[in-house]
Amino acid sequence: MVEEILFVIFSICIIVQGIYILAYFSKLLNFSMSENSNSSLPISIVIAARNEAANLPRLINQLVAQKYHNYEIIIVNDRSTDNSIEVLSELGSKTERIVVIEIAELPDGWNGKKHALVKGIEASKNPYILVTDADCIPDSSNWISTMTGRFSDDIDFILGFSRYEESPGFLNHFIRYETLWTAIQYLSMALAGRPYMGVGRNLAYRKSTFLNFGFLGVENVMGGDDDLFVNQYANSKNTRIQIHPDSITTSMPKTSWSDYFKQKIRHLSAGKHYRKKDRTRLGVFALCNLSGWILLFYLLLSGFNPLWILTIFGFRSIVFYSIFTRIGQKLGVRIAPLTLPLLDLFFNLFHLVAGFRALTAKRIKWS
């Protein structure tokens, strides 16, 4: 009797996953990658940097080389203890596009990165903002034009995609899988008229929208300098996505599990501040994913009709992995198909642990 009940729950979990995969995620697979270049919009690129002396030259050289006329580069040097100021001074002497803002102290009640972004945006002279991170590089010299070309009179947010560099090892493979999976969810939901987050490595928005709302109410929250702003103020009418190859940026991934775990805790900790409807929607899907895997193993070990169990889960996996792989190809992320079941299982277990830690963590640092 217990196995029959668990089989029903297992089937419901698979059905729910199927609804999300076919109703939401397939939208991204069928989305037309429009270039929509508009070179007339005045843009301010804002980067909050702390101890990024090693990364700033590569980023700034790529930004200066952009095929765009009307833009400025604002670097907010947030209490750095390395030689960032010397690096920025040297780079700034080569071009008038660079504006450097130095922050010596952090006001009470503020998170460091949010405060740095606010200061950079307030100092910007243009009505449109494009943000990225110091360790992130645009893949194309048309990055600015391709991202901002999606703006129109009624659009406040452009959600972009940022991938991680590929290198050998399971950690790198998993990071790229997790990043792609996260992107599939937030980009697909935006296409369905339910935007809930973006990534600060590749995000554009109106300056006026930020100045009207900004980080109101979440100034001291660690993380969420990108997704909380989007979560609170993006909607079906004022948000678009951009996934054209020229719009993508690439970051350097963490190289140790401890550093990556800390990064994910910081990212996931922002989730508890999402709108209730977004927490519910994401929570239901995550719960069905994890429960599906747990019940798969339990029912197989109990000997309950393994043919039915494997057939149902196998069909779910074929559909999911097929869409996942094809979207990855579309976004330039190569994931070996044979590793997907392992990555899928590990992802659910990893997020169970990291999510619990994020919900219970009292102090999380931005470095």
Image: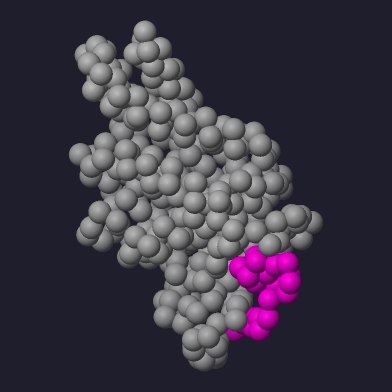
Residue appearing at x 55%, y 88% in the figure: 85
Query: Residue drawn 59% across and 37% down?
Result: 279
Residue 57 part of the magenta segment: no
Q: Which residues are magenta?
A: 94-123
Residue located at (38% from left, 40% from top): 348
| Of the pair 298 and 314, the residue shown nearer to us | 298
Instruction: Tell me: residue 113, above or below residue 260.
Output: below
Q: Is residue 112 magenta?
A: yes
Where is residue 200 shown, x and y percent of the image?
55, 59
Is residue 344 shown above or below 291?
A: below
Nearer to us in this view, 142 or 191: 191
Q: Nearer the viewer, residue 181 or 269?
A: 269
Residue 343, given in percent of the width and then of the height, sits at 30, 43
Q: Residue furthest right?
A: 212
Can the viewer see residue 323?
A: yes
| Quadrant location of the N terminus in the rendered image | top left
Q: Residue at x 26, y 40 (%)?
A: 342
